[in-house]
Image (spheres, rainbow, N blue to C red):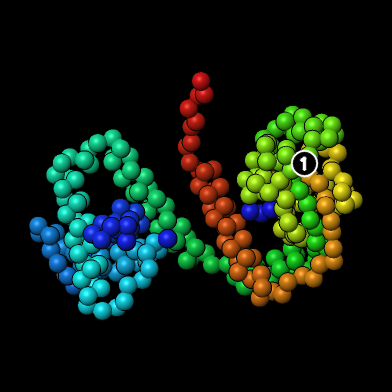
């Protein structure tokens, strides 16, 4: 298992998407930036404008930096405020669907803010990145592997699929029908070429026991589920340079740091699952 963009001239998509969230993020502090317009007494500020532009550019082409473009964006902001005011006046905040959406948006914004602060104060040191490079890249066997994979939830299901393979059902047919690994399932289970550092240890240990063309005799357990593995080919492998994988290794260690933080938070929290029916 591999470790794993104007819809309408006056109401662009970002008005009800990312830009709305961006506009919510700064109300916890006093906005002292320049007032660009007021709408029924509600200020639209330079900070509102900058937040909106950043969110808008995630989904729309950038506008030129000129007075005409600024007026277009400012009018979009005015439309957004007018719509929000009308929604509040109509009592839409109190409807179930809007209430739930606002709650979700608030929680998403707060969660992103905490993660951003955590990552800013727990930066991965270069020494850790280089150590991971030596451990996971330089010391791995200098071979690449091409394999197919069928991922299912239970060992019983995996054994059933192995029986179908032994009775001649093509691997690709079974992968498309049963595999939970979406990207590879669409390709008949094909994982392409990868090295030992790209897969989980239990997957790798099973893989290196196989000859090209051979299917692992037993399903392999990982945190993703149960795998049926077929080794298709292998070839010599030249490890990438540190600069070529530095960003990937950094993100991996960053994710590990976040995972550890979440594990500690869950350990301290009083979490109670409702009984299943």
Q: Quadrant of residue 87?
A: top left
**Residue 272, position in %: x, y?**
48, 32
Single out the residue that lies furthest toward the bottom: 66
Name the residue tied to disc 1: 171
Left/right of residue 137 with respect to residue 15 in the rendered view: right
Is residue 157 in sight in this rendering?
yes
Along the line of sight, the residue nearer the viewer: 137 or 259: 137
Task: Please name the residue shown 83% across and 35% down the image.
Answer: 168
Single out the residue that lies furthest toward the top: 277
Task: Please name the residue shown 84% across and 42% down the image.
Answer: 216
Is residue 225 in sight in this rendering?
no
Left/right of residue 173 with respect to residue 270 in the rendered view: right
Task: Please name the residue shown 53% across and 49% down the image.
Answer: 262
Crowd tier of the residue under label 1, counting other residues whose Cα lies within 10 Å: few below 14, some 14–19, many 20 or above = many
**Residue 212, position in %: x, y?**
88, 52
Single out the residue that lies furthest toward the left: 40
**Residue 29, position in %: x, y?**
26, 62
């Amino acid at each position: 298992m591999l470790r794993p963009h104007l819809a309408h001239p006056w109401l662009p998509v970002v008005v009800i998407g990312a830009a709305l969230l961006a506009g919510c993020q700064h109300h916890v502090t006093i906005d002292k930036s320049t007032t660009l317009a007021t709408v029924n007494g509600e200020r639209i500020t330079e900070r509102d404008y900058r937040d909106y532009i950043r969110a808008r550019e995630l989904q729309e082409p950038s506008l030129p930096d000129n007075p005409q473009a600024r007026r277009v964006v400012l009018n979009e902001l005015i439309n957004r405020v007018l719509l929000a005011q009308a929604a509040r006046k109509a009592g839409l905040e109190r409807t179930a669907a809007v209430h739930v959406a606002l709650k979700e948006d608030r929680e998403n914004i707060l969660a992103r803010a905490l993660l951003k602060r955590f990552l800013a104060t727990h930066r991965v040191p270069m020494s850790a990145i280089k150590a991971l490079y030596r451990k996971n890249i330089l010391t791995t066997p200098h071979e690449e592997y091409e394999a197919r994979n069928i991922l299912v939830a239970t060992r019983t299901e995996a054994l059933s699929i192995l029986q179908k393979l032994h009775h001649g059902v093509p691997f690709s047919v079974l992968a498309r029908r049963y595999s939970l690994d979406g990207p590879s399932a669409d390709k008949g289970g094909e994982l392409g070429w990868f090295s030992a550092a790209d897969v989980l240890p239990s997957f790798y240990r099973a893989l290196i026991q196989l000859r090209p063309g051979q299917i692992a005799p037993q399903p392999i357990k990982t945190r993703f589920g149960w795998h049926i593995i077929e080794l298709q080919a292998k070839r010599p492998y030249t490890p990438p340079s540190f600069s070529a994988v530095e960003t990937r290794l950094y993100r991996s260690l960053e994710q590990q740091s976040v995972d550890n933080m979440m594990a500690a938070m869950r350990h301290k929290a009083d979490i109670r699952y409702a009984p299943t029916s």
